[in-house]
């Protein structure tokens, strides 16, 4: 009889595992997004997409440069440093992407499949990161730059509150000294 609850609990756990596994199946092909994997894209399309991604990244760089000027105009050092950090990262990613684009074109010319896939993947990842950094730079300028300084708290007390301070305990009652119940003489 004692084993029955543990058997039931084990069956429930096992059933839950099977149910979770059934729910985690991959979606059907018609509902999934179009494939952007490097091996499923033709070589001319890789070159075309890589070039488009570079144009998008350069446009992102220009947009972040505009945000940098905006931060400079506001004379806010926190915003300026935040945008400048994102800009530096974008410049590095753009440089890597340009080199990868050249290497991609060379690999395709030499008919090196793995190398071309690798270089194309580098450009795709860099574009995604540039998009993310661009959004972060926009948040830098849009956010309120704040400093923590001295704190001032203003407390408004309603006038209808009693004047008794609830944090102080009332004074103890006076000590009454009573005479003994009988006289000291016998």
Image (spheres, rainbow, N blue to C red):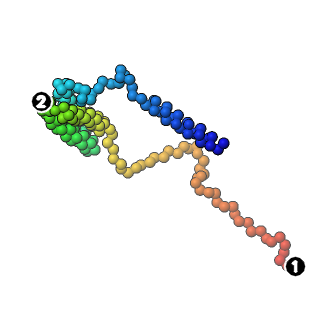
Q: Which residue is mark 2?
A: 109
How many marks overall? 2
Query: Residue 41 or 98: which is nearer the viewer?
Result: 41
In the image, what residue occupies the spot 20% across and 25% down?
42
Picture coordinates of residue 79, whole percent (x, y) = 27, 41
- Point out the residue furthest to the top here: 30
Residue 41: quarter of image = top left
Residue at image mark 1:
186
Whether residue 48 is visible here, answered yes or no, is no
Of tags 2 and 1, the one toward the viewer is 2
Tell me where residue 152 appears, x and y as whole percent.
41, 49
Q: Name which of mark 2 and mark 1 comes first in the sequence.
A: 2
When the figure is inspected, residue 108 is found, relative to residue 181, above or below; the finding is: above
| Secondary structure state at the residue bearing disc 1 | loop
Q: Is residue 115 visible?
A: yes
Question: Residue 29's spot in the image, x, y percent?
Answer: 35, 23
Secondary structure beneath dot 2 equals helix
Residue drawn at (66%, 42%), measured in percent from left and top?
1
x 50%, y 44%: residue: 156
29 shown above or below 130: above
Disc 1: CA contacts within 10 A as few (<14), some (14-19) or many (>=20) = few
Residue 177, image quadrant: bottom right
């Amino acid at each position: 009889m004692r084993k029955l609850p543990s058997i039931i609990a084990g069956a429930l756990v096992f059933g839950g595992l099977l149910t979770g596994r059934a729910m985690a199946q991959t979606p059907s092909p018609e509902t999934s997004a179009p494939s952007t994997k490097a091996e499923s894209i033709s070589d001319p399309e890789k070159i075309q997409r890589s070039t488009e991604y570079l144009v998008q990244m350069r446009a992102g760089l220009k947009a972040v440069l505009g945000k940098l000027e905006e931060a400079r105009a506001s004379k806010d050092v926190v915003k300026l440093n935040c945008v400048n950090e994102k800009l530096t990262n974008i410049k590095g990613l753009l440089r890597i992407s340009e080199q990868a684009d050249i290497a991609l074109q060379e690999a395709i010319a030499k008919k090196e499949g793995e190398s071309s896939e690798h270089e194309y993947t580098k450009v795709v990842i860099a574009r995604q990161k540039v998009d993310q950094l661009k959004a972060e730079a926009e948040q830098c300028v849009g956010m309120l730059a704040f400093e923590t300084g001295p704190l001032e708290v203003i407390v408004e007390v309603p006038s209808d509150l009693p004047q008794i301070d609830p944090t102080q305990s009332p004074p103890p009652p006076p000590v009454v000294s009573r005479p003994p119940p009988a006289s000291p003489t016998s």
